[in-house]
Amino acid sequence: MKKLSINFTFLVLILLYGCGGVNDDKTTNKKSFSPDEIKIQSSKANLFFDSIFDSEVSRDPQRQSYLGIKTDYNKWTDISDEHAQKELEYTKSNLESLHKQFNMEALDEQTKISYRLFEKNCNERIDNFKWRFHNYPVTQMGGMHSEIPAFLINIHTVVNEMDAKAYIDRLLGINALFDQLIINLKLRETKNSIPPKFVFPYVVSDCKNILSGEPFEKGKPANALLEDFSKKVNELKTISVSEKESLIGKVKEALITSVKPAYEKLIAYWNELEKKATKDDGAWKLPDGDAFYDAALKQTTTTSLTADEIHQLGLKEVDRIHSEMREIMKKVNFKNDNLNDFFDFMRSDEKFYFSNTKDGKEAYRVKAVKIIDDMKQQLPKLFVTLPKASIEVKAVEPFREKSAGGAFYEEPALDGSRPGRYYINLFDMTTQANYQMEALAYHEGIPGHHMQIAIAQELSTIPKFRKNGGNTAYVEGWALYSEKVPKEIGFYQDPYSDFGRLAMELFRAARLVVDTGIHRKKWTREKALTYFKDNTPNPEGDNLKEIERYIVWPSQATGYKIGMNKILDLRENAKRKLGAKFDIREFHDIVLTSGPLPMDILEEMVNSWVTKKL
């Protein structure tokens, strides 16, 4: 079905362009265009944008599955460098076509934004292609070794026998996919782009978890993939018991003949690579590391802020939030005014943590569901546009919970077949303080990631690439902003819960200091840990996991606070100018109903809204 729609789009484009495109002469940019001309050219441009998006998706089977498309449901995405270079050529060609076929001045306002965003995205891909070996494809945070099983379990739905056979084909394709992965790792090895030493034991542990259980270990409980497939197939009502048993038998065979050798090859290579790993953590250790980190910061924050400016902003924000925390200490009548003593109290008092048992973990999940359900009832006070997609709360699966992050969000399928999911890591309950539950649920769920991502997916007024794109400053900045908004309508009644909100904001402010400290100022892990311990209430284990995340993901952690601060600045500026005309619901609609935007374009949109209101 999807391939037909893609071909039809290209046919329409050919017909449109054959009937006369816009004037390519850049000297005509100041020409005025009639409303009919603008409408026609904008329609052509949006068809162009959607055709490019559909074309990219047609070459990416895994992305198809995330979007709920089953065209290449039995395949994996090509991760070879040859494929990456072909995609670069597509990008260059698409950018050339944009400039040749469209005059931005002949487009309506929303399509002009699409033009600018498409152009910006293409230029960033082209400019940053030289840094493609400066990332780590396998780390404790993720990579094929953990993402492939999670993908099959959470994304690959089985509603009929064909889906089940596609699942088996994907299992059979893992061996070849991991061969590509190992080649990619070897390419980076030749360029001294090797993860720090601490990463290696995490990855080996995750790989061994995948190779545990039946059919790898006779007499043991079923392996996570076997258990998942068996459950999905046994729920099918359209095939017989014998057919189900046959399919399950084929999965066992695929696990032994493809999955097992794939993981064994990866483990063998990984153990050899570890011998070359060092304890150096920062991006500065990579070739042209400083230039790479500057480029990463620019892409993450969508600003021109330097590493030093970001570092100083972090220090300033940490001081401000500490002052607000001292006010809460007074509210709860803490025994003294020493903030570090209060941090120790919040880290260690048992009343702030659920028991590290099956019942304790389920109690946390149930309470998280209630927090989100309560917030749902209040959304009309804050938003004009609400998402249609539902959201569910899930615990991170056992096979990856030891190394996965504390919480994260997974977007819904475009066709409504899969809800949005708020994942909470319940592996160690001593790292999940109950006083942070509200803020965490608002961030990952509602009104945070789920509102922003689901609304963007459901928009009908912008092209597909804008619905499904994103940058860290916008996406994570909105989610962090969403931790604060509920307080403004009466949530966080418990002062300890309000402290949890501040603790999470403090953590994001401290990230600005630590990320730039590690990657620009050559901080050691020990120095970063000391900074977190002295300035945040987070448990030491949580701090360690966070620092290890920043090490393997340079710059990403800086987007949260910078994005939040920008959204707050835009809101306060709008309030000052509009006075009684300011409507928080309208402001949120402006922020959320154009898809993810760089901070400069978001500012233009808000300022335009303010001008029109005035």
Image (cartoon, helix red, strand yellow):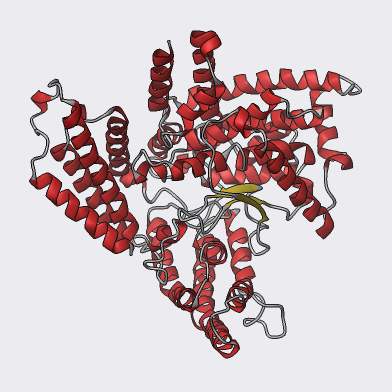
Name the residue: 53% across, 74% down. 264
Quadrant that contains the C terminus:
top left
Residue 349 in the figure: left or right of residue 157: right
Residue furthest toward the front?
36
Name the residue: 81% across, 38% down. 347
Quadrant that contains the N terminus:
bottom left
Using the image, determine if residue 97 lies above or below residue 152: above
Residue 337 can be seen in this image: no
Looking at the picture, how far across and down is residue 259, in whole percent?
A: 52, 76
Residue 415 can be seen in this image: yes
Residue 314 in the figure: left or right of residue 595: right
Using the image, determine if residue 234 lies above or below residue 520: below
Looking at the picture, how far across and down is residue 296, in whole percent?
A: 42, 38
Q: Nearer the viewer, residue 378 or 320?
A: 378
Residue furthest toward the bottom?
242
Name the residue: 19% across, 36% down. 41
